Image: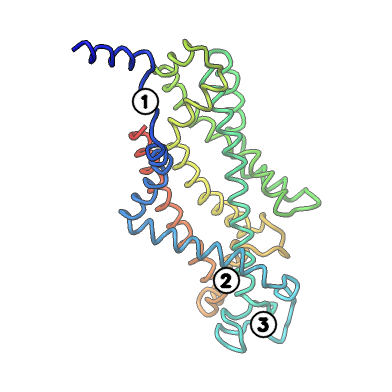
Amino acid sequence: MENRNQEILVEQQIGPESPEPEDNQKLATTGFQVVVREFLKDKVALVSVVVLVLILLLAFVGSLFLDKDSVTKIDILSRYTPWGQDGFILGTDEGGRDVFGLLIIGARNSIMIGFLITVFTSLIGIIYGLISGYFGGMTDVIMMRVVDFIMILPTTMIIIVLIVILPYNNVWTFTAIMSAFYWTGKARLIRSRVLSEVSLDYVNASKTLGSGNIMIMFREVLPNISSLIIVNLTLSFAGNIGIETGLSYLGFGLPPNVPSLGTLIGYANNADIIENKQWLWMPASLLILVMMLCINYIGQAMQRVADSKQRLG
């Protein structure tokens, strides 16, 4: 009995034993295992990942093997060639340009614009919402009034005017204009969630222990709202591709010499093309539909992954 008391006293002085290397390895692989498990359970999400990866490879790797000048070269003698004829997989448009090549380059441009807008707006919105919700008070009031002012502006009309008056319109200028207005929704969403998080015990405990505000915001609060951020990022990515496509369809997106999915769908502007020349607009329409579905299914699976990781701690 005396020996047992001595062992307990030694354990209290030394502390618990350090975890074995195998335990550390298990902790390190837990996150990846959760991702694999959730996607294996959801076959639709798994198929969506495969399809989306194939689309991205076709758009970004396939475009490396295409000469943009030759794809966009006008050839009147080949105008409106139906798909599958004269070596054109998806036919040609009214200028004799290869629709398949335009589809690959256009998909790359649309996906790149959607991704860049999502990244920029998310960075601005998350940081802005974190600061506003975490500090609260007058800081929150002032920051939210700025957001309210931007949100009441006629955003679509301002974007169209800026695109029209800019002397040089390309992928980067279009991304900058879109990012300047579409971060406000994310900021309000993050701010509302952070307001509820800062009142919880773990934030008060971190403040009591002397942790800095930046550390609490980005190491404590941000991981606990990760599921919300993941879902919002996914929907925003799909939505930003749709916004670019819609503006390009209306003629206020990328310039005519820069292919995009919206410019291809824009060919469907009269009854003859819609009924008799489906190869001009149908491939781009189907590609956008498939991408939107895949991104949404992947986002739902990633939400479950984030919730599972939070439950595991």
How many other residues sit within 10 Å of disc 1, few (<14), some (14-19) or many (≥20)?
few
Residue 135, compared with residue 117, is above or below; it is above
Residue 286: x and y in percent read: 48, 67
Mark toward the start of the polypeptide (3 vs 1): 1
Q: Quadrant of residue 85?
A: bottom right
Q: CA distance from mark 1 to mark 2?
A: 75 Å
* Marks 3 & 1, CB-CB < 8 Å contact: no
Secondary structure under badge 2? Answer: loop
Query: Looking at the rendered structure, which numbered label has been put on residue 67?
Result: none
Which mark lies nearer to you, 3 or 1?
A: 1
Mark toward the start of the polypeptide (3 vs 2): 3
How many other residues sit within 10 Å of disc 3, few (<14), some (14-19) or many (≥20)?
some
Closer-to-camera residue (169/27) = 27
Residue at image mark 1: 17
Which mark lies nearer to you, 3 or 2?
A: 3
Question: What is the residue that sits farthest to the right in this orientation?
Answer: 167
Residue 102: x and y in percent read: 64, 70
Q: Residue at x 66, y 58 (%)?
A: 251
Closer-to-camera residue (151/307) = 307
* Marks 1 & 2, CB-CB < 8 Å contact: no
Q: Residue at x 67, y 42 (%)?
A: 158
Question: What is the residue that sits farthest to the front in this orientation?
Answer: 3
Q: Quadrant of the N terminus?
A: top left
Q: Quadrant of residue 151?
A: top right
- Give the amino acid at mark 2: Asn
Q: Quadrant of the C terminus?
A: top left
Mark toward the start of the polypeptide (1 vs 2): 1
Secondary structure under badge 1? Answer: loop
Q: In the displayed structure, does residue 18 sit left or right of residue 95?
A: left
Residue at image mark 2: 270
Residue at image mark 3: 79
